[in-house]
Image (cartoon, grey):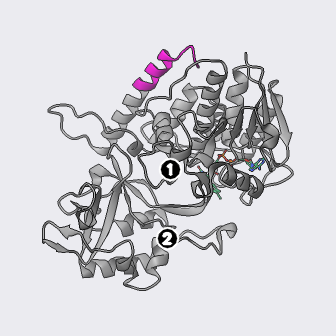
Amino acid sequence: MSEQKVVVVGGGLAGCECAWQLAERGLAVQLCEMKPHRRTAAQTSDTMGELVCSNSLRSDNPNNAIGLLHEELRGLGSLILRLADKHRVPAGDALAVDRELFSADIQAHMFAHPLIEVVQGEVESLQAFAGQPLVIATGPLTSDALAQELVGLTGKERMAFFDAIAPIISTESIDRDIVFAASRWGKGEGQDYLNCPMDKAQYLAFVEALCTAEYLPLQDFEKGVKYFTGCQPVEVIAAGGVQSLRFGPMKPTGLDDPRTGRWAYAIVQLRAENRFGTAYNLVGFQTKMRHAEQKRVFGMIPGLENAEFLRYGTVHRNTFLDSPRLLDEAMTLRSAPQVRFAGQITGVEGYVESSACGLWVGLRLAADLHGKSLPRPPVTTALGALLHHVTDDSVPEFQPTNVHFGLMPALEKVEGQRRLGKSDRKAAHAERARLDLAQWRLDNAGQL
Ligand SMILES: Cc1cc2nc3c(=O)[nH]c(=O)nc-3n(C[C@H](O)[C@H](O)[C@H](O)COP(=O)(O)OP(=O)(O)OC[C@H]3O[C@@H](n4cnc5c(N)ncnc54)[C@H](O)[C@@H]3O)c2cc1C
């Protein structure tokens, strides 16, 4: 057994899950949490593992990517999922919890474990932990002093304080009779972008819809935000004037429409979201529009009438790393191998995803400290796909993600089989994940 005490900074969902997994594998853990002395701007309680907004861990249906992740976490012994099940409240097919009981129980487990020492107080500097294995799980609202320290550790250009996420749609739902592949001025591979051409009437109707759609209100601590150009929500650009999108993300120049041989009046570009080509994002379409409105308004884009949204666009306060450039598959900082990151700060997004990341870092760090070798779960599983995405350096402009089937490789085509419908595809993804995770667990039984 290793004699070293592992330091976990941040007693949120990821930090508590990670600390628990380490302690359950015989490792002594010091868990540092700034509550109850300090709270982030989103927190309202003094307990660890707080759900800062909704009390839902989303769909529990294993044929959805998030429900599949629930199932995988349960199978891998997640504390957070076990306590969520224990404090479940009725919510249809969603796994919703009594937030106070849930969070109080997480905290009680941290205090009660003989190998976990909870230290309450803000960590402003990491210097005191030099030489110790360290996991940073301070979440989307990491305190300012520590965030500054992390900037020093990772480099200024590798840490972001806002995310600006454009919607992501499944490749299969794009109408390729309308949408064409081309790169501007023929640069690059020619297939790097898909392009949705608009005529003048379509463009004007689209801008009008954007300007009159319903948007989510800003949180108090998000007000007065100045966006970098390039991260501006699409509605902010549209509000600048009816032509501003045509001179911004909807610029049509250099993109010949093969059906007309000419440039369209305006273009919406789609960029591949991963190396598997299973999902595309709408370039420059980060937005705070309500989800139902995104479906309606972006459904006006030619070729996206039946788009399947794998995730909706968003813009909000979020501290996160450029993980693909910084972290390896163990979530270790390449430039400082004793430091690992877990949870939302790595670019996974959501309660369950953050817990999942905490679980993986706990499992992997425990294996490493015990001198065992534990590979990451296959990319065909929900957990593996999520972890792969946040460390995949083929993605040039990294933005946080929650789990969706578009993160996984496409399903193998079966000769002679008709194309599967949406729900059959989801079920097939889930079944493949189940088989592959079972095999991974079998192969690594001694390392878990
Ligand atoms: C406003 C808001 C609303 C959200 N709504 C949802 C939602 O409805 N559904 C959803 O799935 N996800 C939501 N999220 C995302 C959600 O926060 C994360 O998914 C999840 O809580 C992140 O888990 P985590 O453990 O990585 O971080 P957190 O849960 O934030 O935990 C980090 C912990 O670190 C502590 N900490 C921070 N700095 C220090 C320091 N210097 N020293 C010691 N301790 C420190 C904090 O007090 C906190 O307890 C929301 C996020 C925000 C900001």
**Residue wearing tag 2:** 233
Q: Could you tell me residue 215's position as x and y percent?
A: 52, 71
In the picture shown, does residue 430 fall above or below 286? Answer: above
Q: Could you tell me residue 375's position as x and y percent?
A: 51, 25
The amino acid marked with disc number 2 is Pro
User: Residue 116 lies in what quarter of the image?
Assistant: top right
Of marks 1 and 2, which one's residue comes earlier in the chain?
2
Q: Could you tell me residue 308's position as x and y percent?
A: 35, 54
Viewer-side residue, 59 vs 249: 249
Categorize mark 1 by other alpha carbons within 10 Å: few (<14), some (14-19), many (20+): many
Report the residue that reaches farthest toward the bottom: 241
In the picture shown, does residue 357 fall above or below 274? Answer: above
Viewer-side residue, 270 vs 395: 395
**Residue wearing tag 1:** 401
Residue at image x 43%, y 79%? 238
Numbered range of the magenta stretch: 435-448
Viewer-side residue, 90 vs 332: 332
Q: Is residue 348 left or right of residue 188?
A: right
